[in-house]
Image: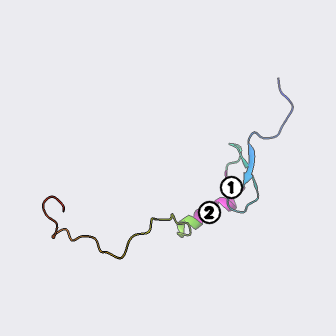
């Protein structure tokens, strides 16, 4: 039995590219983006290193130990 509802299955989410509505469904070939343009722009941003993953800050006050000065047990 069908309900006659022809709306595509899925839900509407915010497009990560433009912020507009995007259908998150297998029927949207660009998901989670709303269009090929937004998907391509995001790919270009990755290629140009505009996205970065934060790294833990490193202590720069003391240099790492000199391996030649360590004993056989590593201390």
Q: Main secondary structure of the magenta part?
A: helix
Picture coordinates of residue 15, whole percent (x, y)? 71, 57
In this picture, which residue range is highlighted in magenta? Answer: 30-44
Find disc 1 in the rendering and name its residue: 33
Q: Is residue 32 magenta?
A: yes
Between the residue at mark 1 and the residue at mark 2, the CA separation in whole angstroms equals 9 Å
Q: Is residue 38 above or below residue 61?
A: above
Q: Hey, which quadrant is residue 61 in on the image?
A: bottom left
Q: Hey, which quadrant is residue 40 in on the image?
A: bottom right
Q: Is residue 41 magenta?
A: yes
Specify whether 33 is left or right of 74. Answer: right
Tell me what residue is drawn at x 16 percent, y 66 percent: 70
Q: Quadrant of the C terminus?
A: bottom left
Picture coordinates of residue 7, whole percent (x, y)? 82, 40
Q: Is residue 63 above or below residue 43?
A: below
Picture coordinates of residue 65, whole percent (x, y)? 24, 70
Tell me what residue is drawn at x 64 percent, y 65 percent: 41
Find disc 2 in the rendering and name its residue: 42
Query: In this figure, what is the number of numbered marks?
Result: 2
**Image marks 1 and 2: residues in contact by CB distance under 8 Å:** yes
Q: Quadrant of the N terminus?
A: top right
């Amino acid at each position: 039995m069908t309900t006659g509802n022809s709306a595509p299955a899925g839900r509407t989410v915010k497009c990560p590219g433009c912020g507009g509505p995007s259908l998150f469904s297998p029927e949207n070939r660009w998901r989670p983006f709303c269009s090929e343009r937004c998907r391509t722009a995001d790919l270009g941003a990755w290629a140009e290193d505009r996205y970065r993953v934060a790294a833990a800050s490193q202590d720069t006050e003391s240099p790492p130990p000199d391996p030649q000065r360590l004993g056989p047990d590593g201390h």
